[in-house]
Image (cartoon, rainbow, N blue to C red):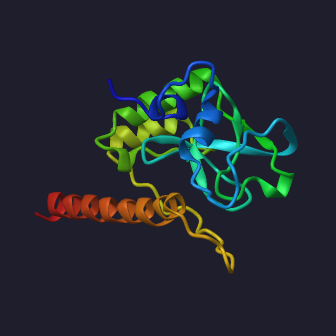
Amino acid sequence: MMVIETAESYFARTPGTPGAERVIHLHWYRRDVARFVPTEIAPSPVAVAVVNYGRWIVRCPFCRGAQFAARDDRRFFCTECLNEAVARRWIRVRWPAAATITGIDEALLARPGDHWRNWEPGASVVQLLAENAAGNWHHSWSTPRDWTTGEIVTASIMNTHVRDEFNEAVAAQASSAVLAIQVFG
């Protein structure tokens, strides 16, 4: 069965380990800091769950990295910047209402491939269904990332901000070419 991936579906199930902590245990790459799990939650900011390339993710509000979002554990800890801006504490993650999540998942799974499965807050399920009916799945480029001097560029950052955006552009060009052939012969 196809699903829009989350931390729970993508990472191996670990009994007793909440979804957001699975990301820390299975995606920690830092060699300069020993792996740890925060014990406190910062009062702000609140991150937002989005769908990117067929995955529910959370974009880090501090370094603009991104990781899988966990439906059953609405906390986020960035293994890129370690949430240094909030003293290495978790931040909360805002998700849409449960019925809206189901509608988003169903609408996006009706699309022909992960590169067309994108959702940002502000887009309704009705809009997604209308896009599906019209065959208009194009997703515009995300806001360009801010880079900082001395930053360690990781595979996660490059995949989110270069590979996925490139794949979006290629898919959009291919779709536009097919549409032009259909319209103009």
At horizontal 54% and vertical 40% (from top left) the residue drawn is 26
Residue closer to the observer: 174 or 54: 54
At horizontal 40% and vertical 29% (from top left) the residue drawn is 3
148, above or below 32, in the image: below
Judged left or right of residue 21, residue 90 is: right
Residue furthest out toward the bottom:
149
The quarter holding residue 65 reads bottom right
Q: Position of residue 178 (x, y in %)?
A: 20, 59
Is the C terminus in the top left, top right, bottom left or bottom right quadrant? bottom left
Judged left or right of residue 15, residue 109 is: left
Q: Position of residue 20 (x, y in %)?
A: 64, 35
Residue furthest out toward the right:
43
At horizontal 43% and vertical 42% (from top left) the residue drawn is 54
Q: Position of residue 96 (x, y in %)?
A: 65, 31
Q: Position of residue 133 (x, y in %)?
A: 34, 38
The quarter holding residue 121 reads top right
